[in-house]
Image (tube, rainbow, N blue to C red):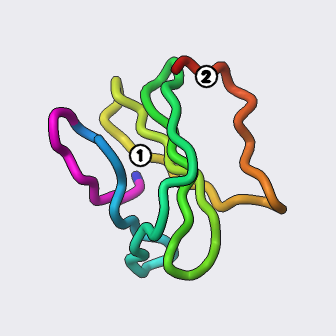
Amino acid sequence: MANVRCYAGASYPERPVAFEWEGRWLEVVEVRRQARTPEGLRFDVLAEDGQRYRLDWHATAGEWAIMPASGNSLDWKVPIHV
């Protein structure tokens, strides 16, 4: 299970602010894209280490998944509901 800290205004998670990757916490510099998926929410973020990551919130399971970006784009092939 991945660890993600979020800002939660009206709902959780409104937007991620930091996450744990390979044993260290990284601050989110920018949320580049956000979308609803059948499982919950997906965020394309730029972290303080200069890398992009995909953070997936699986609402039913109450868990996060983190995946580093490969190349210049993230895989957004799952159906996206805006």
Residue 75 in the image: above or below residue 69: above
Tell which of 20 and 41 is nearer to you. Answer: 41
- Point out residue 35 in the picture as x, y percentages from the top left corner: 52, 32
Does residue 28 show up magenta in the picture? no
- According to the picture, the residue beneath numbered tag 2 turns out to be 80
Q: In the picture, residue 13 is in which quadrant?
A: top left
**How many numbered dots are placed on residues in this image?**
2
Magenta region: 2-11
- Point out residue 37 in the picture as x, y percentages from the top left corner: 53, 24
**How many neighbours does mark 2 have within 10 angstroms: few (below 14), some (14-19), or many (20 or more)?**
some
Determine the residue located farthest toward the left in the rendered image: 10
- According to the picture, the residue beneath numbered tag 1 turns out to be 64
Does residue 9 show up magenta in the picture? yes
State the SS at label 1. Answer: strand
- Point out residue 51 in the picture as x, y percentages from the top left corner: 64, 72
- Point out residue 12 in the picture as x, y percentages from the top left corner: 23, 38
Q: Residue at x 46, y 70 (%)?
A: 29
